[in-house]
Amino acid sequence: MTEPIKVHRSEDISTHPLNPDVSVIVPITERPEDLVELYQEYSEPLAESGRSFEFVFVAEPWGRRLTEPLLDIAAQGQPIRVFQVGQTMGEAALLRLAAAHCHAPVVVTLPAYRRIQASALGELLRGLHDGVDVVTARRWPRHDAWFNRLQGWVFHGLLGSFTRPRLRDVACGVRAIRRDVLLQLPLYGDFFRFLPLLAAREGYVVSELSVPQHERDTSTRLYGPGVYLRRVIDLLGLFFLLRFTEKPLRFFGLLGSLLATVGGGVLAVLLYQRLHGQGIADRPLLLLGVLFLVLGIQAVALGLVGEIIVHLHASGRRGYRLVHHPTSTGSEPEAQSTAWSQRKAP
Amino acid sequence: MTLGTPHLSVVVPLYNEADNVAPLVDAVTEALTGSTSWELILVDDGSTDQTVATADVIAARDDRVRLIRLARNYGQTTAMQAGFDHARGNVVVSMDGDLQNDPRDIPSLTAKLEEGYDLVAGYRKSRKDKLITRKIPSWIANRLIQRITKVKIRDNGCSLKAYRIELLRSIHIYSDMHRFIPAVAAATAGARIAEVPVRHHARRYGTSKYGLSRILKVLGDLLTIKMIRSFRDRPLAMMAVGSLVAAVFALALGAATIVASVGFVPQKANAVVFPGAAMLWLGLTGYLLMLGLVAEVALWEHRRDGGEQLPLVHEEDA
């Protein structure tokens, strides 16, 4: 495959710290606001706190118009880097790309629109000490529309019913995370939303921190039915991935044997009636019984194929992560190399 | 103390066994005094009590004791696999961290292994456990496991086992497979397996991490292993058998459709129910065949990458 990603960099990087303390990643996806203003607002508290930092903006082709002013102020010596991918890749790919290219050991992911007050960034970063690997921001107290809060409450209720730690604002998107942790997480599709949960699954320590909501984060968000459907599918996928990635047959086997038992039971009743002289040719119940039995067999067979795939991969994969420890000789698994290739713009 | 690679590695998964760590290390040290060089690998499976702190102190004091910490609680199987991955000895012994196994049995296990076996399993001669919740389920489970896996092991639940390192390098356990290591070893590596009787003590400290619910899990895992074992070499053939059975049902119902429409008083429902059911079975016929093909593709990719391992062999002396 030829390089799918074009990398445009600001030319003058002489004033940038080579090894900053913090990299702030801004994937430009939906509803971007004025990026220069955004940069100024969020970089101010970082500069005041004395940390060296860089801002890494990643944009899809349609976002070029928005990033051009950033290059202007980067040329004036602001620590800004701008990456432009050649195709629409989705937010997860943008995050992965930015994580692979940023320089600091600590990363803050920031949406391209205002969610939390800029002054809270320092608090998030301070939360990353003491063995904590991921700090995720929760906007609290909320002052946006009651409808936003209601749908958030329902979503997080569902999410909290099967995941730990219990998160109350995965939509916020502002997170402080160690870079090596970010590089090891399987971020793809829509699962970047659940980044803290994926990190917890790998045994990293995750904490949620309440921070004041930005006063401009007030728009009522009513989405189309497709978006809500996708959220439900996300939850279903997450449920399966967290519980059954190592044992698909437990999931499909349970489902399949339930279906097959119902179907078999219906057929047994029909057989009993047939043996007592009652005709079954005109009974739609026969169709239902066969349907359930067939579905049950299909589910089990599918689980079996899943199990084979897991079994084949088990030999090449370590299913656990170690904590680095003075008296242990175990080594951390290598950081996943990212598949992206880069090319500097001429 | 002992430098270089030890001959024997003892692997012990620990989950919230703070009170048991020190007595365990003492017992192992005492049992192995005077024998070949050894190491004890304590695998902490995300304990939330003082297990790590206690083990840490001991590991810092004694070079032969190593502590490996998993990032969270992964379960006993993964903890054992982690211990196996870090074992350096030619012979590996696994045992429970709750002191119900007796390290004094280790020499008899390794002695049996030297006779030319790849795996020696201990079986508990007189179990010190509750009859209803532990012994009877265990007895039923062992019978089932024997019958289904065709591996004659009296006591699959006993963790005290000795393995040749070559065997452990050729098998990988995941999910809840630690109870079936002999079955997995026999099926995928062609291991030679023997049994020796071992002592068993009642639990002194801490609480048991098992419940009655594990019986269902064991049964499910057993079926999984059985299915993988018979399925993984020729999935298409296995699926084709299922497919054929479905096709027979489809044909039978197709025949019933004809009989019903010719012989019976024609009713509207006749024209729907039998052919409908026939078509469902026909659908399953095609579905299973396609799934078998997908499984073949997955296996083909695996084999082409050299993923298939040779069984263990013993070269006979001339």
Image: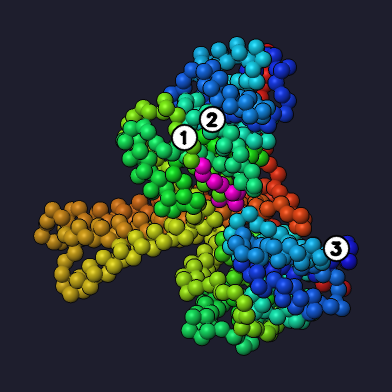
**Which residue type does callout 1 highlight?**
Pro
Instruction: Confirm whether residue A120 shows in the render.
Output: yes
Q: Secondary structure at mark 3?
A: loop
Contact? badges 2 and 1 (CB < 8 Å): yes
> Badge 3 is on which residue?
B5
Looking at the rendered structure, whether the residues under marks 3 and 2 are on a common chain is answered as: no
> The disc labelled 3 sits on which kind of residue?
Thr
**How far across and down, in percent of the image, does residue B49 sit?**
61, 64
User: Residue visible at 66% across and 29% down?
Assistant: A51
Residue wearing tag 2: A119
Q: Is residue A206 magenta?
A: yes
For label 2, the crowd category at 10 Å Cα-Cα, with few meaning under 14, some 14 to 19 and many 20 or more, is: some
Judge depth for marks 3 and 1 and give the one in front.
Answer: 1
- Dot 2 amino acid type: Ser
Question: Which numbered marker is on residue A282?
Answer: none
Q: Going 15% across and 55% down the picture, which residue do you hit?
A: B269
Q: Disc 3: which chain?
A: B
Residue nearest the viewer, comparing A33 with A288? A33
Task: Tell me how far mark 3 sits from mark 2, CA to CA.
Answer: 55 Å
Give the residue drawn at x 88%, y 62%: B4
**Would you say residue A287 sits in the magenta stretch?**
no
Q: Rounded to the nearest whole Å, what is the CA distance between mark 3 and mark 1?
A: 56 Å
> What residue do we see at 45% from left, 57% from top?
A251
Residue numbers of the magenta segment: A201-209
| Label 2 – label 1 distance at C-alpha | 9 Å
Can you tell which of label 3 and label 2 is closer to the viewer?
A: 2
User: In this rendering, is residue A81 above or below B136?
Assistant: above
Label 3 crowd bin: few (<14), some (14–19), many (20+), radius 10 Å: some
Residue for badge 1: A212
